[in-house]
Image (cartoon, helix red, strand yellow):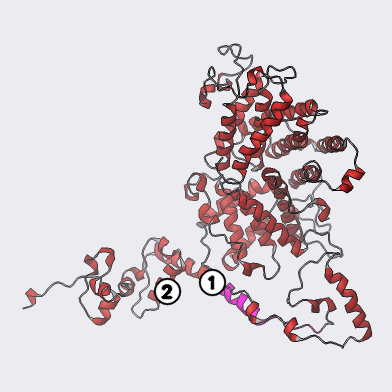
Amino acid sequence: MEGSKKRRLQGACDSCRSRKKACDSAQRPGAKCSNCVAFNLECTHIATMSRKNGGIPLNSASWETTEDLQVHITAILQPTYAGPKDNRVTRPLLVQLARYIRQLEAKISALENQANPVPASTEVEDPMSRLSISDNKNRHYGAEDDTKFIKTAIDLKQTLDPNHSLRRPLYWTLPFWQHVPTFLQPPLLFPPSDLMDSLVTLFLNTTNTQICLLHGPSFRRDIANGIHCTSREFGSVVLAVCAVAARASPDPRVGDGHSAGWQWYSQLHPLDPVNYVSPGCLWDLQLFALMVLYLYALSVADQCWLFIGMGIRLAQDMGVHRKRRTNEPWTPHDESLRRAWWVLIGLDVYASAMFGRVRTTNSDEFDVDFPLQVDDEYWPGELLADPITPWTQPPDIPAQVTAWVLHLKLLEIYGFAQKTIYSVQRTDFWDALSTAKWGHNVAVELDSALNKWIDAIPDYLRWDPHHPSEPSAVLYTTYYWVQIQIHRPFITNADRWFSSIAVCTNAARSCAHVLYAHFTVYERIPLSNMLATTLYSAIVLLLNTANSNGESAMATPRDLEDVYRLMEVLRRHEGRWQVAGRYHDVIAEVFALLQEPKPQDSSRKRKGQDAEEQLDWGDLGLDANNLIPSHGLEDSTDWQGWTSFAWEEFGVYLAGVDDGRPF
């Protein structure tokens, strides 16, 4: 009675199919049949998948993890497997399999190198190499290292009897249990090729022109050669570049709002101890710098300070911080290492200033030269390079890297201020050598250094408000920020408080004008430090407005308008930069504590002022006629005392902003 037979359900699971049992997975929730539930088995459908389009769904997201990819590999190895007939499926699958194979090849090669170290050379062994139980000879040791002292005893032994040795293997060989185990990490997931090319181009044309971290031509060649698929270190750098560039990209695939680029940043894991059993490489240094550039915009800024320290320590371990003592030709790799070092140094200065913490290193602890003022296309091996005199920039073409070198020299001036003016405690030796006006003398010398620095700026990098450029905007806003930082500690000094207030106020006004003129023309942020200069300029102007009726007041009605414009700059970028929104809120909060001087005639515009430039207090969420007076400022003439209090209060606010904690 065939007509009475129950109709067989389609898509039986692998377990029911092998046991020839009826399967009801098609009717069960989660497609898990009752037989597998009863016997606590995994309900899989690999055999069924292999007959439908080769077992591969159209959604490429189904093989984005190693586990999912393993399922597809298992299906391919089945005798009944048939390849997918849809080209939309075939190519993405082959590409992902190829990337997975490259990752495995790289891991196998690394494991083979560990299991089969390079045989000993026939050359005479360096006696110092026997001091270490590591087989790595690429680490740097300074002149004061203890091994230099011990070497004198080794040299004496070499003179008396080179073959004499009483070293016991137990203490001079690395036991197997001290080897850090390696773990297979999932393959990196890169953006689609068109998006990745767009993000790389965006980074090289924006952020990289300001800090000169990457050598653009070789970076593009390495991507074209697929090195990011074979080397996890370089692949991580590529992902970090995509993450940083995502904030300036209009492509919706980069992510929404503050999370733009997070899908690529979240794959980066630089803290694996296995990575640093041996000395680091160029890509490690570049990765730390890029991760800091990305993290600064988020609410986890504390990690920036840690990553900068790790990057600098890794570079010191490689000897990048020291000037080369040999006459070997300078290579693009050498220059790239030097560039990475100086980017980390610049970030170290900014992080120390923002967090109020000690720097990882100071200028008297390294002697490496500044980057060569030669653009990428003129490096040796490039098409435009001079084959006779390498590392030569054409005299009629200004080098882009010149702006970055000037930036570093400016930060070097402020670095000296950090070590002197902002020192936590001076030793007795300083007091013995200094005078009663020691701080005053330091400030005078720093002002003199700043004057020499600004006089040395070439004409094409000088600020022109009618033709603003990104390099000049970065240089001048940083210059005004350094001025504020140098004179801020002397606001509470009875001998210098008035002159220091004048310098800070003028610097804040000038910085506000540069920022507003720049962001009127350019939409993007060329370098993240401009957000900090925006905050500090607004703070100075607000403090200056606090005693606008005092005897020594220097405030003008334009100061509050400048503050408003600075808030507009921050508001414009808070959609992608979380820290910009935080800075905006800090300014708005403190602004509400001050008694606003009422405009003499709010209905009358200043001559030459457009309607859209009028100061609109309503946009700030404040009532111009009912602001909150605080601390008796409306009757106060103690500008010096108020300023001291206000800087301390702002310190509390900034601590909440900069260390990732809520206010």
**CB within 8 Å, label 1 to label 2:** no
| Mark 1: few/some/many CA within 10 Å (<14, 14-19, 20+) | few
Image disc number at residue 391: none
Q: Is residue 491 above or below residue 421?
A: above
Q: Is residue 339 at least partly visible in the picture? A: yes
Q: Is residue 201 above or below residue 17?
A: above
Q: Which amino acid type corresponds to the residue marked 2 in the rendered image?
A: Ile
Q: Is residue 485 above or below residue 294?
A: above
Q: Which amino acid type corresponds to the residue marked 1 in the rendered image?
A: Leu
Looking at the image, which is closer to me, 279 or 81? 279
Q: Which residues are magenta?
A: 104-122
Q: What residue is at 83 percent from the left and 71 percent from the top?
A: 147
Image disc number at residue 73: 2
Coordinates of residue 464 in the picture (x, y in percent): 72, 30
Q: Is residue 465 at least partly visible in the picture? A: no
Q: Residue 288, located in which quarter of the rendered image?
A: bottom right
The residue labelled by disc 1 is: 184
Q: Work out which residue is located at the far right of the displayed protein and give it.
A: 160
Q: What residue is at 55 percent from the left and 12 percent from the top?
A: 603
Q: Work out which residue is located at the far left of the displayed protein and give it.
A: 1
Looking at the image, which is closer to me, 137 or 639? 639
| Mark sitting earlier along the chain (1/2) | 2
